[in-house]
Image (cartoon, rainbow, N blue to C red):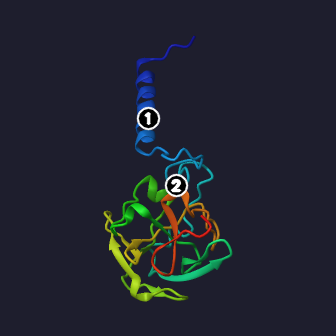
Amino acid sequence: MTRWKPQQRACAAAAAAFALLGTAACGDDDGGSDGGPYGTDPTSESASPSPSETATAAAAASLSTATDDDHGEFLVDNDGFTLYLFTPDAEGTPTCYDACATAWPPLLTDTPDVASGGTVDASLIGTVERTDGTTQVTYNGWPLYYYADDDEPGETDGQGLQSIWYLMAPGGDANKAGD
């Protein structure tokens, strides 16, 4: 039997406590097997970087629409990547930070002037300041996010996850079609 040194026991205990704390704080409340509370495990190899993680704050944002047979019409960014709303943000204030924002990166902009195309209603476009000082694009008051596992433009893998993540419909509400 191998005996641990006091430093090894302390490190192991700290690691176990940290893991339990993280599980308690971010537990999967619906019993699903999607890997985490936000639909993906941001530490797993399958969790890819945001569709345009580095580009989200690099320039002005642009909103347009896409359509597919399963979900109908929904909002996308200027590169065609799908945009989602997070139902806990109902009051218009972003609440997705840290591990959540790793799995669901916000759509950021460096200017309040957000371009629009398709059937996007330009009067519903806005911005909100995040706690880190960045500016997140909103639509009808809803802060907009990407899903990190959407690897290609038009993918909708985040639709309906945890019953709190939905495609953003051009009308300004959650698109729950195909959910």
Q: Residue at x 48, y 46 (%)?
A: 29
Image coordinates of residue 88 in percent, x first then y, are 39, 60
Q: Give SS at disc 2.
A: helix
Report whether 76 appears left or right of 122. Answer: right
Q: Residue at x 45, y 36 (%)?
A: 19
Q: Amino acid at mark 2?
A: Gln
Locate residue 98: give its quadrant: bottom left
Image coordinates of residue 48 in percent, x first then y, are 59, 58
Q: Which of these two is toward me, 80 or 171? A: 171
Vertical placement of residue 57 versus 45, above or below: below
Q: Which residue is mark 1?
A: 20
Q: Amino acid at mark 1?
A: Leu
Report whether 5 appears left or right of 131. Answer: right
Mark 2–mark 1 Cα distance, whole angstroms, equals: 21 Å
Q: Residue at x 46, y 27 (%)?
A: 12
* Foreground disc of the pair 2, 1: 2
Locate residue 141: give its quadrant: bottom left
- In the picture, which quadrant includes the C terminus? bottom right
Please give the label number shown on residue 162. Answer: 2
Vertical placement of residue 169 versus 89, above or below: below
